[in-house]
């Protein structure tokens, strides 16, 4: 394939409108995602107000090193994603692919670190149940939310890796044209959402009880 | 030739219709044509409709007598649960938006397709995947939680297939979100030149308002069910009261979706009825602007009334008072719409074709459902009738009397557009009357039984309620017959029905300006819109004679 297929698709008449439409569509979807995570945060808030002491106790059991390093890793991936998006606009194909690959690498580092953290949490008996490490039963609520929130975030992140990976493979083989392709912007916005969610989760999970 | 081209017009183009763009199964299952996807949805929701109908038929047979004589208590619980889950999430929520909406939204705004055609097809596959999970739950042994999945019963005590059913609804939810995103983007981005926001047909506004609710409410349901699955499957304590969790919070989250879901079901119905009533009264819709504001108002206020499902759950009394007040407020825009439809009929040249009969049926039944909704919004009355058949009758008047009637109104109204064929008008009118009669026969007695204290969800009941249950069950037989009839005469029309022509109802609206069935591209040339919708006649020229004017939209320019 020497020439990349045209970016313009049915039913759009012109590319600028298609790009507007795709960006608008992903923003609507992000609004939906905001409600998705919003309801989890509501649950967190209600439980935390009902059991302030248990939440402080439980929050201290999380590993702030993993959390903080992962925050830095993910924020850096946001930077590389933003650069990739701009590079695609400027028709700098190699830089785009390079930055997209860096984003995937950083995302994978995040998941690997998260995996080590999960293993440590298991060892410390922080999975709610009979062998749970803390005495206060409400501490189990905190850790239910910890596993749920970080798990759902990790699933979102994995989907993001898939989307970026697709751009790298398709773009690298010139199966799709990256310049002016609405998929780049859409993927970038989704990736930034995953990062923004993490920025909210970080203080709620790791800074809880450490002030 | 017996083909009736009613407007005396010839097909505008010789392009093959969307039906002729491929005849293999794969050409349907991989099509990104919004019209074909609408047909896929129509087939799948019809299947689910009858599946849910079979479940409730067994329930109605059981309730014929006060004793348990057909099914056990456990089976009974599973039957009404299955009926609820299937009807709500696999019929009512997708019904009008994904069939009529999918087909008509691009046509009505003068677009070639929805904004994201592949996402549209993907949403159908999501819906089917969700349906398969739910059907697996049925085949594996059923679910007995009721469609509301209340914790802690669903998470800790039920021995049935809750996870599969919840997973099915969870997946189907994403199909809703995808459809909502698609419709919102389509309405914003793909309107034809001249199609300003306040020239949009009310059906398009209805789809838009519905999509807003789908996009913003469904994720909350997704989370709620996800948490339920986490708690039941992985034993993470989330709503478990023994560890300080709050089961009431589950109800808040559940109803934060499930009350707005009622508007996902009824807003599209309002859109359909607005199109049908204007056409068959030959009248411009009364108060177009207020119809739009009312729909958006319902969509917005509908998000803040969920607590009226929880008056007896133990929520704060102050919360209950606020929710009660807001529930009265949300009735105001609905009432505005009922008055405006009625005012549209005033001095109209009304004719009683089948779609109009279904629409008029909607008007009456929706009003009864809405007014009894006000009874239930009032806390003292609600406390008295909570969990009785009064509530069951109320929401069936809205969802079946309202939404399903409107779905049939729309199905008949646009059938010639979908298929290019005319159905048997006599049979269709008969079915419409039978449906109205059967519906009232089934559900009106439930108001009385419920008011007298008959609780819902029991397979045995005190003998003094038998008379109402016999009426109800007999009515259900009539209703079932009325639902089966269209299956026959509509299918019959596909084989030998007369050709419909582009515009058999002499209606305005862009969808009637293209051929029936429309070509793959919808329009040979993207139309340019210069008029408001419902240009049936100017207000100053209200008709005085009973003779219908042939007044076909752009033909008069």
Image (spheres, coloured by chain):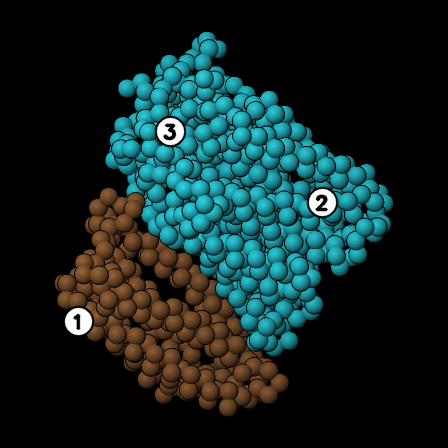
x then y, percent, for residue B390: 69, 44
Q: Secondary structure at mark 3?
A: loop
CA distance separating discs 3 and 2? 40 Å
Label annotation for residue B515:
3
Q: Nearer the observer, disc 2 or disc 1?
A: 1
User: Where is B43 relative to B406, above or below?
Assistant: below
Residue B543 visible in this rendered orientation of the protein: yes
The extreme top residue here reads: B545
Mark 1 — on which chain does it sit? Answer: A
- For image coordinates 65% across by 50% down, the residue present is B83
* Residue matched to label 2: B57
Mark 2 — on which chain does it sit? Answer: B
Label annotation for residue A95:
1
- For image coordinates 36% across by 60% down, the residue present is A30
Are the residues under marks 1 and 3 on the same chain?
no
Quarter of the view holding residue A207: bottom left
Q: Secondary structure at mark 2?
A: helix
Label annotation for residue B235:
none
Q: Which mark sits nearer the N-terminus, 3 or 2?
A: 2
Q: Secondary structure at mark 1?
A: helix
Specify the quadrant that holds the N terminus of chain A. bottom left
Residue B387 visible in this rendered orientation of the protein: no
Disc 3 residue crowd, few under 14, some 14–19, many 20+, Cα 10 Å: many
User: Where is A169 relative to B273, above or below?
Assistant: below
Quarter of the view holding residue A11: top left
x then y, percent, for residue B339: 50, 29
């Amino acid at each position: 394939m020497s020439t990349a297929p045209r970016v313009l698709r049915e039913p759009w008449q012109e590319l600028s409108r298609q790009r507007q439409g795709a960006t608008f569509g992903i923003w609507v979807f992000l609004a939906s995602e905001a409600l998705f995570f919003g309801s989890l945060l509501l649950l967190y808030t209600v439980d935390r107000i009902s059991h302030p002491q248990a939440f402080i106790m439980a929050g201290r059991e999380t590993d702030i090193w993993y959390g903080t390093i992962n925050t830095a890793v993910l924020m850096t991936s946001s930077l590389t994603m933003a650069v990739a998006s701009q590079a695609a606009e400027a028709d700098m194909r190699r830089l785009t692919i390079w930055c997209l690959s860096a984003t995937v690498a950083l995302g994978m580092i995040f998941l690997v670190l998260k995996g080590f953290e999960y293993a440590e949490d298991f060892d410390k008996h922080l999975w709610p149940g009979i062998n749970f490490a803390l005495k206060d039963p409400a501490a189990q609520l905190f850790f239910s939310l910890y596993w749920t929130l970080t798990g759902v975030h990790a699933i979102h992140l994995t989907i993001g890796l898939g989307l970026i990976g697709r751009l790298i493979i398709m773009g690298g083989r010139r199966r799709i044209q990256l310049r002016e392709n609405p998929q780049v912007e859409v993927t970038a916005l989704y990736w930034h959402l995953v990062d923004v969610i993490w920025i909210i989760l970080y203080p709620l999970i790791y800074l809880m009880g450490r002030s | 030739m017996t083909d009736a081209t009613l407007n005396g017009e010839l097909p505008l183009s010789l392009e093959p219709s969307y039906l002729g763009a491929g005849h293999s199964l794969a050409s349907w299952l991989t099509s990104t044509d919004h019209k074909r996807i609408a047909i896929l949805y129509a087939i799948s929701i019809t299947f689910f409709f009858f599946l849910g109908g079979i479940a409730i038929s067994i329930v109605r047979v059981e309730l014929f007598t006060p004793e348990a004589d057909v099914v056990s208590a456990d089976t009974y619980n599973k039957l009404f649960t299955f009926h609820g889950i299937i009807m709500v999430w696999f019929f009512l929520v997708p019904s009008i938006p994904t069939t009529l909406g999918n087909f008509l939204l691009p046509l009505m705004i003068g677009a070639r397709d929805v904004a994201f055609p592949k996402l549209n097809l993907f949403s159908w596959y999501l819906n089917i995947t969700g349906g398969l999970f739910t059907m697996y739950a049925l085949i594996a042994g059923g679910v007995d939680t009721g469609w509301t999945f209340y914790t802690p019963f669903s998470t800790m005590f039920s021995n049935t297939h809750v996870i599969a059913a919840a997973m099915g609804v969870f997946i189907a939810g994403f199909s809703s979100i995808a459809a909502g995103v698609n419709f919102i983007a389509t309405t914003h981005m793909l309107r034809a030149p001249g199609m300003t926001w306040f020239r949009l047909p009310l059906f398009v506004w209805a789809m838009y308002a519905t999509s807003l609710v789908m996009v913003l409410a469904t994720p909350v349901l997704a989370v709620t069910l996800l948490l339920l699955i986490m708690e039941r499957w992985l034993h993470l304590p989330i709503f478990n009261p023994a560890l300080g969790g709050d089961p009431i919070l589950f109800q808040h989250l559940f109803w934060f979706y499930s009350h707005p879901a009622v508007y996902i079901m009824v807003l599209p119905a309002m859109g359909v009825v607005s199109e049908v009533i204007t056409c068959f009264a030959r009248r411009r819709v009364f108060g177009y602007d207020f119809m739009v504001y009312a729909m958006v108002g319902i969509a917005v206020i509908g998000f803040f009334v969920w607590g009226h499902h929880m008056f007896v759950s133990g929520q704060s009394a102050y919360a209950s008072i606020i929710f009660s007040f807001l529930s009265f407020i949300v009735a105001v825009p609905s009432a505005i719409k009922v008055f405006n439809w009625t005012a549209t009929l005033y001095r109209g040249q009304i004719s009683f074709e089948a779609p109009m009969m279904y629409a008029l049926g909607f008007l009456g039944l929706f009003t009864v459902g809405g007014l009894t909704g006000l009874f239930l919004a009032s806390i003292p009355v609600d406390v008295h009738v909570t969990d009785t058949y009064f509530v069951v009758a109320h929401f069936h008047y809205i969802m079946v009397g309202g939404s399903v009637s409107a779905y049939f109104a729309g199905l008949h109204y646009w059938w010639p557009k979908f298929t290019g064929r005319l159905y048997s008008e006599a049979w269709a009118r008969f079915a419409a009357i039978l449906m109205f009669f059967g519906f009232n026969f089934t559900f009106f007695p439930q108001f009385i039984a419920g008011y007298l204290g008959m609780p819902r969800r029991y397979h045995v009941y005190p003998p003094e309620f038998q008379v109402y249950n016999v009426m109800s069950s007999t009515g259900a037989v009539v209703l079932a017959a009325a639902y089966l009839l269209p299956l026959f005469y509509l299918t019959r029309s596909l084989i030998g029905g007369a050709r419909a022509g582009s515009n058999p109802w002499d209606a305005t609206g862009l969808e009637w300006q293209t051929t029936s069935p429309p070509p793959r591209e919808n329009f040979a040339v993207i139309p340019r819109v210069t008029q408001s919708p419902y240009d049936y006649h100017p207000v100053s020229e209200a008709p005085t004679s009973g003779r219908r004017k042939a007044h076909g939209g752009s033909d008069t320019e």
